[in-house]
Amino acid sequence: GVELCKIIKDIPALKNIPIIFISGAVTSDERIETLESGGDDFLSKPFHPKELVLRVQKRLKSYAPEETTQLNVGNIKMNLGSRQCYLDNKEIPLTPKQFEILKLLIENKSQVVSRQDFMNEIWGHSDITPRNVDSQINYLKKKKEGFLGQITSVPGYGYRLDSSS
């Protein structure tokens, strides 16, 4: 548990997740070790279930994950809250799928996103084919004329978003 806690706390996206240790260990050295590893609380066995619930509730109140509300690449800005996309401050009308595709490309800027990843992340089921991904990408490319960058096809695999800025 201590080693796993250290690993979790070293990952930027996970470091703020509260960790409560529950153990039959009662020595002060063991409790100190769990807290030094990044643990947020410690509960000794046996414990009352209500105590656990209260400790979890308290930790969750103070846990506020860092949420990204806007993504930027080149001259494109995506507002994730309003689900609007702008190119040079002019709104680009995107379908929900196109919005999610562009979001995934921006989140993975300069990295290849496979067609299978698009199918899993955007559609979440297998009722579509890689051709559906290709069609949506082509529609998206037409809508983003003037973008300072490009969506590049990686033949037989997927797509990559490259930006000149």
Image: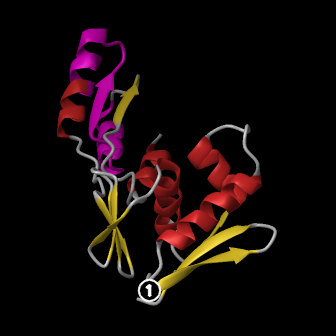
Question: Which region is colored magenta?
Answer: 27-56
Q: Is residue 54 magenta?
A: yes
* Left-right relation of 98 to 65: right
Residue 90 image offset from top left, x and y in percent: 29, 72
At label 1, counting other C-alpha atoms closer than 10 Å, the crowd grade (few under 14, some 14-19, many 20 or more) is some
Please tell me which residue lies in front, 141 or 59: 141
* Above-or-below relation of 146 to 100: below
Residue 27 image offset from top left, x and y in percent: 33, 32
Rendered image coloring scheme: secondary structure
Residue at x 44% of width, y 81% of height: 147
Which secondary structure lies at badge 1? Answer: loop
In the picture as drawn, the residue positioned furthest to the bottom comes out as 164
The residue indicated by pointer 1 is 148
Residue at x 35% of width, y 12% of height: 46
Please tell me which residue lies in front, 165 or 130: 130
Quarter of the figure that contains the C terminus: bottom left
Please tell me which residue lies in front, 109 or 122: 122
Residue 111 image offset from top left, x and y in percent: 59, 73
Quarter of the image holding residue 86? bottom left
Quarter of the image holding residue 133? bottom right
Using the rendered image of the protein, determine whether residue 131 is visible from the camera's viewpoint. Answer: yes
Using the rendered image of the protein, determine whether residue 48 is visible from the camera's viewpoint. Answer: no
Which amino acid, by three-letter code, is at mark 1? Answer: Leu
Residue at x 29% of width, y 43% of height: 32
